[in-house]
């Protein structure tokens, strides 16, 4: 099957993350502005062309002070590094509708290979006849690998902000003409 172009349906998609706070709990957040370029046969992603862009200024953790701190030079430095990008380099099928998607992730001026576990969730037509597909992606990255090293030592030992960031993406896309 030929590759088909798909456009992200942002009202039915999300880019979420979580990170340990004070070594005892997790803080969750989301990015409200993102897009992807997808050319794929949804039944076989191994030949797909996938690139993803996240507007880092759109971070939302339900706390304005924390969100502003994340946008600052201590973390994302959105003034100088406004986007996170991911470009798939290899896609390996690991099971029925299951893939490992490896590519160049660029954040804070650093590019590294990262792998996400991607699941094809299905396809169907919406009430208006538009063809839609759904995917889930999960992975983790170390923020220190990208130069995001701001932290504060805790009186009890350890650090305020964890290094491992869990990433979860739910993506619905609509077939383009």
Image (cartoon, rainbow, N blue to C red):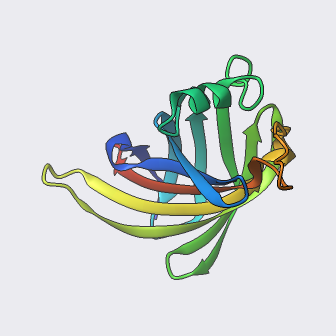
Residue situated in front as seen by the camera: 22 or 100? 22
Identify which residue is drawn at 38% across, 41% down.
10
Q: Provide residue 135's location: percent of width, then percent of height.
A: 45, 61
As displayed, is residue 63 above or below residue 79? below
Identify which residue is drawn at 78% across, 47% down.
143
Q: Is residue 137 left or right of residue 87?
A: left
Which residue of the protein is positioned furthest toward the left in this rendering?
127
Quarter occupied by the C terminus = top left
Q: Provide residue 47's location: percent of width, then percent of height.
A: 60, 62
Q: Is residue 144 left or right of residue 70?
A: right
Residue situated in front as seen by the camera: 136 or 125? 136
Q: Quadrant of residue 78?
A: top right
Which residue of the protein is positioned furthest toward the bottom in this rendering?
95
Q: State whether residue 89 appears in this view.
A: yes
**How many discs appear?**
0
As displayed, is residue 60 above or below residue 87? above
Residue situated in front as seen by the camera: 44 or 169? 169
Residue situated in front as seen by the camera: 101 or 84? 84
As displayed, is residue 62 above or below residue 165? above
Q: Provide residue 62's location: percent of width, then percent of height.
A: 47, 38
Q: Quadrant of residue 157?
A: bottom right
Q: Provide residue 116's location: percent of width, then percent of height.
A: 65, 62
Which residue of the protein is positioned furthest toward the top in this rendering?
79
Identify which residue is drawn at 59% across, 63% down.
138
Q: State whether residue 49 appears in this view.
A: no
């Amino acid at each position: 099957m030929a590759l088909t172009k798909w456009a992200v349906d942002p009202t039915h998609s999300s880019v979420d993350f979580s990170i340990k706070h004070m070594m005892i709990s997790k803080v969750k957040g989301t990015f409200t502005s993102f897009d992807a370029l997808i050319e794929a046969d949804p039944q076989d992603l191994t030949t797909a062309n996938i690139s993803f862009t996240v507007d880092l200024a759109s971070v939302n953790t339900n706390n304005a002070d924390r969100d502003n701190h994340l946008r600052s030079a201590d973390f994302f430095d959105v003034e100088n590094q406004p986007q996170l990008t991911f470009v798939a380099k290899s896609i390996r099928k690991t099971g029925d509708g299951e893939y490992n998607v490896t590519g160049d992730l660029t954040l804070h001026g650093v590019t590294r290979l990262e792998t996400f576990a991607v699941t094809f969730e299905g396809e169907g037509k919406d009430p208006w006849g538009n063809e839609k597909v759904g995917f889930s992606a999960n992975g983790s990255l170390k923020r220190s690998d990208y130069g995001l090293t701001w932290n504060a030592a805790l009186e009890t030992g350890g650090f305020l902000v964890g290094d491992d960031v869990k990433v979860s993406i739910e993506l619905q896309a609509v077939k383009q003409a």
